[in-house]
Image (cartoon, rainbow, N blue to C red):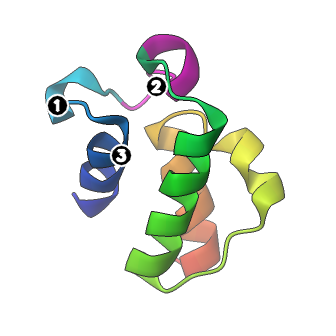
Amino acid sequence: MKLKEIVCEILELDEDEVTETSLFNEDHGADSLRAIEILASLEKEFGVVIDQSEMARMVNLKGVREVVGEAAGW
């Protein structure tokens, strides 16, 4: 799944370290700069525009999938 690949690449984690609900910041030490990198990479990969206010929901894979899905109309 491309979403998880992008997130894991930016966070420098193996895919088996990240679950649907593990928190990027608390569980994986991601800072706000990494969150912005994830946002930019997802926008580029999926051809969508995501409002920065949505970053508050993008704390784990489940949230990222929901935000990108809404932006992409999945």
Amino acid at dot 3: Ile
C-alpha gap between disc 2 and disc 1 = 15 Å
Q: Earlier in the sequence, mark 3 or mark 2?
A: 3
Residue interval drawn in magenta: 20-27
Q: Which residue is mark 2?
A: 21
Q: Residue furthest front?
A: 33
How busy is the neighbourhood of tag 2: few (under 14 within 10 Å), some, or many (20 plus)? few
Q: Which mark, residue 51? A: none
30 relative to 28, above or below: below
The percent coordinates of residue 53 (x first, y second) are 83, 55
Please report the residue visible at 70 percent of the width from the left and 42 percent of the height from the top: 57
Tell me the residue that label 3 is attached to. Answer: 10
Residue 73 seen in the figure? no
Q: Secondary structure at mark 2?
A: loop
Closest to the observer, 36 or 74: 36
Q: Is residue 24 magenta?
A: yes
Q: Nearer the viewer, mark 3 or mark 2?
A: 3
Marks 2 and 1 close (CB-CB < 8 Å): no
Task: Bin the neighbour count of mark 3 within 10 Å (Cα to Cα): few under 14, some 14-19, many 20 and up.
Answer: some
**Does 45 appear above or below 65?**
below
Q: Are marks 1 and 3 in contact (CB under 8 Å)?
A: no
- Give left or right: position of 25 versus 8: right
Kindly report the distance in space between the C-alpha atoms of the residues bearing marks 3 and 2: 17 Å
Of the residues shown, which amino acid type is indicated by label 2? Thr
Give the number of the disc on residue 14: 1
